[in-house]
Image (tube, rainbow, N blue to C red):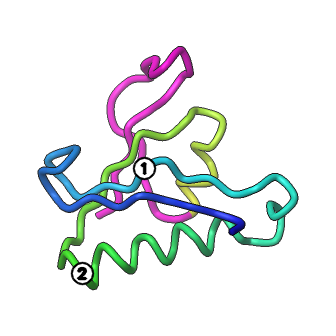
Amino acid sequence: MIGYSRIFKAGDYFKEASIGRVLVKKQARNNRNGSLLMELSIKAIKDYFKEKTIKISAQIYLKKFYNELGFDPIGEEYLEDGIPHIAMLLN
């Protein structure tokens, strides 16, 4: 296994459908594996849950990565488990 993500239908975690705990092994990064994992997670939410809006809680250093996938920041930065995060939304 080189990567993992969790998907949630609307109401499970946020009001919107969401993706969480995204991870890719260090040695598997820089080969588009993270982007592919996110693209497949987004597709799974759209296919299985019929949701168009997806909310994530992104670590600040990954804001550009998620923005390139279509997510836009909403609100202010906050700490989650002592790590700076920002909420992001894909419509």
- Frontmost residue, 81 versus 77: 81
Q: Position of residue 14 (x, y in %)?
A: 20, 44
Q: Is residue 76 magenta?
A: yes
The dot on residue 91 is none
Disc 2 target residue: 48
Mark 1 neighbour class, 10 Å CA radius: few under 14, some 14 to 19, many 20 or more: some
For image coordinates 23% across by 71% down, the residue present is 52
Quadrant for the C terminus in the image: bottom left
Furthest residue toward right: 27
Position of residue 66 relative to residue 75, above or below, is: below
For image coordinates 35% across by 60% down, the residue present is 90
Quadrant for the N terminus in the image: bottom right
The dot on residue 20 is 1
Q: Position of residue 87 (x, y in %)?
A: 38, 37
For image coordinates 61% across by 75% down, the residue present is 36
- Frontmost residue, 31 versus 1: 1
Q: Position of residue 48 (x, y in %)?
A: 24, 81
Position of residue 39 relative to residue 76, above or below, is: below
**Would residue 29 appear left or right of 45 to someone viewing this image?**
right
Which one is earlier in the sequence, the residue at label 2 or at label 1? 1
Res 31 → quadrant: bottom right
The three-letter amino acid code for the residue at tag 2 is: Tyr
Q: Secondary structure at mark 1?
A: strand
Position of residue 56 relative to residue 40, above or below, is: above
Question: What span is colored magenta in the figure?
Answer: 69-91
Q: Secondary structure at mark 2?
A: helix
- Count of numbered labels shown in the rendering: 2
Mark 2 neighbour class, 10 Å CA radius: few under 14, some 14 to 19, many 20 or more: few
The three-letter amino acid code for the residue at tag 1 is: Gly
